[in-house]
Amino acid sequence: MNEIYAKFYNFLEIGDNYPTIVMGVLNLRPESFYQGSVYDNAKKLELAIKNMINNGAAILDLGARSTAPWSEKITIEEEINRMESAMNDACKIIPNNIILSIDTQYRRVAQRALEISTKFKKKIIINDVSCLKTDPDLGDFIVENDLPIILMASKKVPGDLLTIDEIQHEFNKTIELMERRGYDGKKLILDPGIGRWVDKKAPEFDLKIIGNLTKLRSLKKPILVAISRKSFIGAILNVPEPEKRLNGSLSATAIAVYKGAHIVRTHDVNQQLTEIIKIAEQIRKSE
């Protein structure tokens, strides 16, 4: 089996023979489904950033727009305003070996984020849950600036219903499109899109994605999973409140790491997560 390996900005190595990367979620949006992840003022954001870094996060994911299907929509201008404020605060305190992930589907937001990160001499990666479907100009921007990007599997809208084979197909199409534009495919990270992004998505879809995660190895890119407190956990455990889904999140995360996930995007960056990741890694490596 071919080894999966990538190196970002000459200091962050991701792959089969490297520790699983932890990405901490920093929501800037009051519309978020999990209110425990919302950091809507500078002091709360600073405390969360320091806590996540101290507990091993290598990437911090800043999200200014809720992508939940029931959430209130905001303008691109509002998204930029939220992102600007948080980035200016974050860039003042993060060390240079921490990457900021910019969770956006829009070129204008990514462009402003790059301007701010350049001013502070920080590194960013773009995290697009639409797989470049919402704003095709974002793909051009990524190529023009040679930026790393996380692509979440989507066909028409973020997180629509896809089987594991359809996920592979959509990823292949986007990878080929980017590489034809001259983009270095080694800067891509793939997210299969776990979660109830559309109303008709049943928990079984997420279970099959996690159970068949190894199939995505054929794409030869690092795999990111965003399992933390998602609705399929609540459905299985009959726990409607995201605040009570930590145990289920950790269990599913352990299985995803065992199945080959290289990056874990999570609201809960702590010693408990670190330990379950290490155990899952060691079991995987023992086979």
Image: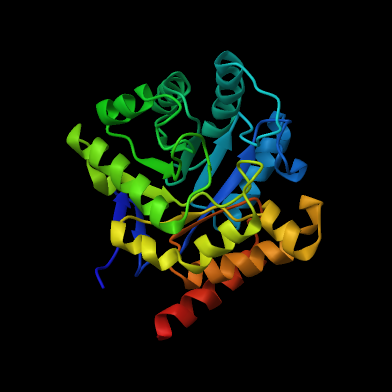
Horizontal and vertical percent position of residue 80: 55, 19
How many marks the image carries: the answer is 0
> Relative to 276, is 147 on the left or the right?
left
Horizontal and vertical percent position of residue 279: 54, 78
Nearer to me, 275 or 284: 284
Task: Tell me the quarter of the picture where residue 218 sits.
Answer: bottom left
Pick the quarter of the image with the N terminus: bottom left
Look at the picture and state if 274 lies above or below 93.
Answer: below
> Relative to 11, is 68 on the left or the right?
right
The residue under the point 55% across, 22% down is 84
Nearer to me, 227 or 147: 227
The residue under the point 46% across, 25% down is 113
Task: Tell me the quarter of the picture where residue 261 sits.
Answer: bottom left
Q: Is residue 121 visible?
A: yes
The residue under the point 58% across, 49% down is 24
The residue under the point 56% across, 36% down is 62
Q: Residue furthest front?
A: 200
Colouring? rainbow
Task: Tell me the quarter of the picture where residue 198 sits.
Answer: top right
Q: Is residue 5 visible?
A: no
Q: Residue furthest bottom?
A: 286
Horizontal and vertical percent position of residue 133: 42, 31
> Relative to 175, is 126 on the left or the right?
right
Pick the quarter of the image with the C terminus: bottom left
Nearer to me, 275 or 207: 207
Q: Residue furthest top?
A: 77
> Relative to 264, is 173 on the left or the right?
left
Horizontal and vertical percent position of residue 86: 60, 28
Look at the picture and state if 119 lies above or below 51.
Answer: above
